[in-house]
């Protein structure tokens, strides 16, 4: 049996409420040359039973189910990578879902441009309100190509804009298709972390890829606000982000790549530190992470490897100053004050959205008016046509029409007789 084009690897941990939607979105793919490798990460719900039902479905592509004790998504993905045979690898989380054309478009782009990585835009699916939202952070933003009107037809590499590669495309693995040989030949694996485990993996793949391309379509739906995902609750593993950035820095140094990507790494690491600190929900978790950063983790992460003015965001710069000063109270007060500014910005954004919505409604009303007028014209034309057909029918029934038809029968009869 020939190898599939794509190996889809899905770590599964207590995902029963959402697992069917993820699997159904794979079943609906317009591109079906893939294998699905599901790794049950010690689930305590009925996720494993759901996987077995889909494995028995004859209309579903080949499904393999692997199991392990609860070691986290990174170890689960590594276990899937160990048995993957596809030319490409795609990582789908068990609580997410994808558009039907995702694999077709991603593989098509990879083949068209000979890419090691293809990246696409994404939705955040708000599980609480059951609707898509665009992420608050950018997902596709590579400044070097901002002025290219045909950038989707270009392939590029991290070296084309080394100061922006990490901040441009996120470290999510679920909105990227990877050539499997890129991962195998460069020994790119996930660390054994429960959170931010995707950072060293994705960032190393980005800098090692020969050719990268982007698809400016939202093809993935990342489920959030479930109350159970790592995005929703970071406190149990509050220090994992420190280890992840330190691991990436160490690997870049080992490969002789750190100086090339030092600025991008530092900017992404500081943004990650601020984001993770501000996402913690317990006082003890925050205090532990803040103290760790001050006591050496900031240096391990590379936050001090660039001058302060290398950080482009003033909020990040001030945050780093407060971390270096070990001023946790000042840090919290600073972000409390800025939260008010964010709320004002949100209100302004909502005002603009409401204005745009009102304008869109007016345009819809105008188009409805045009449709109604066009429909009236069609009805009028239909009436005129029916009147013409009625007059024609009256003509056919008229004496003149009947007599004319009868007269034509005489020469036809003569013609038939002469030809006999």
Image (cartoon, grey):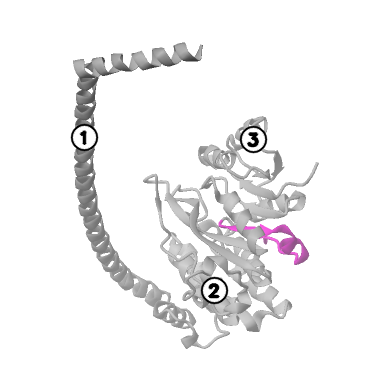
Quadrant (top left, top right, bottom left, bottom right) of the N terminus = top right
Mark linked to residue 379: 1
What numbered label is drawn on residue 35? none
In which image quadrant can residue 54 be found? top right
| Disc 2: CA contacts within 10 A as few (<14), some (14-19) or many (>=20) | many
Q: Which mark is residue 60?
A: 3
Cα gap from disc 1 to disc 2, whole angstroms: 65 Å
The answer to whether 301 appears left or right of 364 in the picture is right
Bounds of the magenta segment = 175-191
Residue 409 in view here = yes
The disc, 1 or 2, on the residue closer to the chain's N-terminal end is 2
Mark 2 and mark 3 lie on one chain; the one further toward the N terminus is 3
Earlier-in-chain disc, 1 versus 3: 3
Q: Residue at x 63, y 48 (%)?
A: 11
Q: Residue 171: x and y, percent? A: 57, 64
Q: Residue at x 45, y 11 (%)?
A: 417
Q: Which residue is mark 2?
A: 269
Q: Is residue 260 above or below residue 383?
A: below
Q: Give the x, y percent position of residue 361.
A: 23, 52
| Residues marked 1 and 2 touching at CB (< 8 Å) | no
Instruction: Give yes or no for residue 44 being in the magenta stretch.
Output: no
Pair 2/3: label in front? 3
In this view, the mark in front (1 or 3)? 1
Q: Residue at x 36, y 72 (%)?
A: 335
From what the image shows, is residue 30 above or below residue 360?
above
């Amino acid at each position: 049996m020939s190898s599939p084009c794509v190996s889809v690897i899905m770590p599964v941990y207590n995902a029963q409420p959402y697992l069917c939607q993820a699997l159904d979105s794979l079943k609906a793919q317009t591109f079906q040359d893939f294998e699905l490798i599901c790794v049950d990460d010690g689930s305590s719900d009925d996720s494993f039973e759901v996987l077995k039902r889909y494995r028995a479905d004859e209309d579903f592509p080949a499904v393999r189910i692997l199991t392990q004790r609860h070691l986290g998504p990174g170890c689960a993905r590594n276990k899937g990578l160990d048995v993957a045979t596809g030319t490409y690898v795609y990582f789908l989380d068990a609580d997410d879902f994808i558009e039907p054309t995702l694999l077709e478009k991603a593989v098509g782009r990879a083949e068209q441009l000979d890419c090691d990585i293809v990246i696409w835009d994404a939705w955040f699916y708000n599980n609480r309100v059951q609707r898509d939202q665009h992420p608050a952070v950018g997902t596709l933003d590579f400044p070097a190509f901002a002025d290219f009107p045909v950038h989707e037809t270009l392939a590029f590499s991290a070296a084309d804009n080394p100061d922006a590669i990490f901040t441009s495309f996120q470290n999510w693995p679920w909105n990227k298709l990877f050539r499997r040989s890129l991962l195998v030949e460069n020994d790119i694996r996930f660390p054994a972390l429960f959170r931010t485990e995707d950072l060293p993996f994705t960032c190393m793949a980005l800098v090692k890829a020969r050719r990268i391309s982007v698809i400016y379509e939202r093809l993935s739906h990342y489920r959030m606000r479930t109350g159970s995902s790592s995005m929703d609750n970071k406190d149990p593993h509050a220090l994992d982000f420190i280890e992840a950035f330190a691991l990436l820095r160490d690997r870049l140094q080992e490969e002789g790549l750190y100086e090339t990507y030092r600025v991008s790494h530092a900017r992404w690491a500081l943004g990650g530190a601020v984001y993770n600190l501000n996402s913690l929900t317990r006082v003890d978790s925050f205090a532990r992470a803040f103290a760790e950063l001050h006591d050496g983790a900031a240096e391990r992460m590379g936050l001090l490897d660039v001058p302060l003015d290398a950080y482009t965001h003033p909020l990040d710069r001030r945050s780093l100053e407060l971390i270096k000063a070990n001023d946790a109270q000042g840090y919290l007060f600073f972000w409390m004050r800025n939260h008010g500014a964010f709320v004002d910005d949100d209100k302004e954004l909502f005002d603009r959205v409401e204005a745009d919505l009102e304008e869109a409604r007016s345009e819809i009303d105008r188009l409805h008016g045009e449709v109604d007028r066009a429909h009236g014209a069609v009805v009028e034309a239909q009436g005129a046509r029916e009147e013409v057909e009625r007059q024609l029918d009256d003509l056919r029934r008229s004496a003149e029409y009947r007599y004319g038809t009868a007269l034509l029968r005489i020469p036809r009869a003569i013609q038939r007789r002469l030809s006999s």
